[in-house]
Structures are given as structure tokens and as C-alpha cells.
Amino acid sequence: MSTNKSKRKSLLTYWTTRYLITLCVGLVVFGVSTSLWLNYSEKERRLDVLRFMAAEISDRIVDDNGHIQIGPFLTPIFDRQRKFLQFNGQPFLLILDQNNNVLFNSLPSKMPQELLVDVTTKLNEEDGDQLTLKRGEKIYVVKRKLEHNNLTIGWVVLMSPEKEIYKVRDSQFLFIMLGALALLGWIIIYLLTKKLAKPIKGVAHAAKEIVAGNYDIHLEPNSKEKEIFELIHSFKDMADRLGQLERMRTELLAGVTHELKTPVTSISGLIQAVRDGIVTGEEAEEFLDICAKETSKLHKMVEDLLDFNSFAVGDVKIQKEEQNINTLIQEITHQWLIVQEENSITLRKQFPDHSIVAVTDPLRVQQILYNLLNNAKQASKENGVIEISLYETDNEIRINVKDNGVGIPEEEQSMIFEKFFRGEEKKLKVRGLGLGLPFSRLLAQALGGNLLLQESVKSSTTFTLILPK
């Protein structure tokens, strides 16, 4: 991918330039086409005017006896007709008798005599002849027979140079109009593109702020364009989420460092004391027992972290088989109670009278329930009670785990399934990485169900594991 920044243009420059080029090309094509059409229309109109003038003159100069009358009245009539019909040029008039002798001639003296020869030799051809002089000038010719008793007694010929025929009166106005349209179109697209570019530039600036580590960005949220509005709000949500994740990452590093450093420091200090002979005998054995426990806890935290990372990338397999859920929960709770060191927890179970059967992975269900039971024990007061109940609906199997602990603060309830999140109360009591509930929810979803916080008040908390039937 090219990184040459000199080839990049701003949105405003890029689109206004493209629009202006497109607009100019379009207007040029339109202007040329319109000009050609106007020229053609004007040529036909002027030729029709010349034909009408020739017919009018022929009617006036032939008397009742078939004689051609040329008098001083002819020029005023000719000029009056020309002005009345709005013929701006000065056409040339020829009147010929039946022998092609010139009776009246308004041709200027500079007009070559070859024109007369060409005209007289083509009198019997169609109207609207175009003659080209030796010097390249083109002349349009309109002819009208003078007739009496069906006999040709002469000709009326009107001629006009091509430049007069194609002189479009509104051509200047046309090009002024096209120029004004081009300028107006460019101004409009400039203003619209500038308005469009402003929020995009704001998003680009905000992206640079995020790259620099500043997630507290400010964007104009009230855009009227739907796409821009969605872009701004999506970007703002992304920035807020990234900021939240950055804070969690910072807390994670601090938490992991603390949680892993504490047992390592304890183990190091205790082993050093035994090694240096500061403690001996039973006290040394007690120090080694403490080291073993701390090592076990450290090993558990590392296992949790590895398990979560493996499952997050899809490396953990699910092996489902048909299970009697009543029996499965009985076995899981019995095994969990055996390894509890204190007998201060009372576990109450409530099952339906009939057996509930589902196809699921018993190992993953055990992992989820172990985690819920451990959390319930940590949250419970002295002589705590944990209630586990099983019931089913038309489509689901639900397992509730309820404790009689202090509950989860309302402001923390929406965060408990976030990776590495640990409540303020739990941070002070239990070491861990904050992966238990997120990992359990991932397992539940992999089984086709879910894990929910059903209820949490100051006297109890209830989690619900949902499994599909």
C-alpha cells in the first residue's frame, strides 16, 4: 500500500474538483449541442422569412397584365418587411425577367459577378441553394418564380451570407447562462461538501486522539444526515468502550501483578526463613505447609488465565452426552462439599420429584457450578447457607445457586461478567483474576444456554444457569 501523502487530497478538494470537472464537461456538451440546435433552428427560421419576403415581393411587382413593375416603392416595402419579420441582416434582392436579365439588383459592388452567373444558372433548381464563392464565403439563395397565366415571366431572388443566417441572437445569453450555472453549481457543491467534510474531519481528529491515548473525545452528535449521525455515535460508543477496556487493562495489570506477586513474595520469604534456619522443627513444617497452599493458589490463578484464553480463541472442546441432571447435580455438590475445609457452610438442595434429562457436557457443568458455589461461599457470612434448586420450563432447564451473603452493589452488577472485573468488596477478601464468571458464562453459552445474575440484594444473591432441553 502506498504511503505517499502528497497523493492524498482533502474530501473538500477532491469532490469539488471532480464535480467542477464533471459540471464543466456536461455544460460544454450541453452548450455545444444547444448552440448547434439553435443555429439550425435560426437558419430554418431565416430561410422561411426569406421565402415569405420573396412571395410578398412577387405579389406586389406583377400587375394584372403580367408586366413586372419596378419602382421606387420597392425598396421601402422590402425594408419594411425585413424589419417587421425581425430579419436583422441585410439580404440582397435580385429581380430577373424571363430571359434572366437583371431588372433590380441590391448586391453591393464588392460582391463578385460570379454570384450572378451561379444564381442564374440554378434558377430552376430547388429553393434553399447554398453557393460557395471562390474566396470561401458561402451564400444562401431563396428563389421565387414570377408567373402569369401559368407562364414564367421572371424571378425574385433573395440572398443572404451564411454568417447572417447563423447569427443566433441569444448565443451570448446562452453562454452567460451556462457560465452562471457552472459557478452556481460549484458554489453549491463546495458548501455541501464542506458541510459533509466537517463531521468526518472531527471523527478523523478524534481517531488521532484515541491513538494518542485520549479516549475522552467530543463530537457534534446532532447531525441531520442519517449515515453521519450513525458514524459519529458508533465512533463515540467505540471510544467509550476502548476507554473502558483501557481502564480495565490498567486495572488488570495492576491486579495480576499484585495477585501473582503476593503469593510469590510470601513463598520466597517463608522458604528463605526455613533455609536460613530462622525457623526449625514444627514451625518450619508449618511454613512449608503455607508455601504449599500459596503455590496451589498461584497454580489455580495461572490455570484460570490459561483456560480462559484457550476458550476465548475456541480451543476448548465440548463433549455432550445424555445426562440425568438431578443425579449430576447431586454428584457435583457432594464432591464440592468434600474438599471444603470448613464445615460452616450449609448446602440445601431442591429438586423436582421427576428426573430431568438433557444432552450436555457434565465436565463443563461441573466447572460452572464449582465456580458459582465458590463465589457463594466467599460472599456468605459466618454459618452461611447456599441453596441450589433445579426446575424446568417448556424449553429450558434452570439451576439456581443462591447465597445469604452481602449481595453485589447495584453499580457493579452490570460489570460482573466483564473479563478481569473484580468488585471492591471481593478485592479486599479474596485473591483472583476476575475470570470466574466470564469463563462460566462462555462455558454456558458453548453448551447452548446462558448464565445470568437473577437477583442481588443486601441479604442474598442468586445466579441462574440455563441449559437447553
Image (spheres, helix red, strand yellow):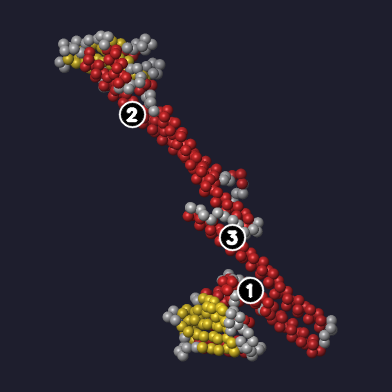
- The kind of residue tagged 3 is Ala
Mark 2, other Cα within 10 Å: few <14 / some 14–19 / many ≥20: some
Q: Earlier in the sequence, mark 2 or mark 3?
A: 2
- Left or right of residue 110: residue 182: right
Point out residue 271 in the picture as x, y percentages from the top left corner.
Answer: 79, 81
Residue drawn at 53 percent across, 59 percent down: 234
Q: Evaluate if marks 3 and 1 touch, with contact meaning CB atoms under 8 Å apart.
A: no
Which of the numbered marks, if any, corresponds to residue 422?
Answer: 1
Label 1 element class? loop
Residue drawn at 78 percent across, 81 percent down: 270
- The kind of residue tagged 1 is Arg
How many numbered circles does the render carry? 3
Distance between mark 2 and mark 1 Cα atoms: 86 Å
Quarter location, residue 138: top left
Q: Is residue 112 visible?
A: no
Q: Is residue 190 above or below residue 92?
A: below
Q: Is residue 381 above or below residue 4?
A: below
Q: Evaluate if marks 2 and 1 touch, with contact meaning CB atoms under 8 Å apart.
A: no
Q: Is residue 19 above or below residue 445?
A: above
Q: Residue under circle 3?
A: 239
Point out residue 127 in the picture as x, y percentages from the top left corner.
Answer: 27, 21
Q: Residue under circle 2?
A: 41
- Left or right of residue 345: residue 94: left
Point out residue 232 in the picture as x, y percentages from the top left corner.
Answer: 54, 56
Point out residue 40 in the picture as x, y percentages from the top left corner.
Answer: 34, 28
- The kind of residue tagged 2 is Ser
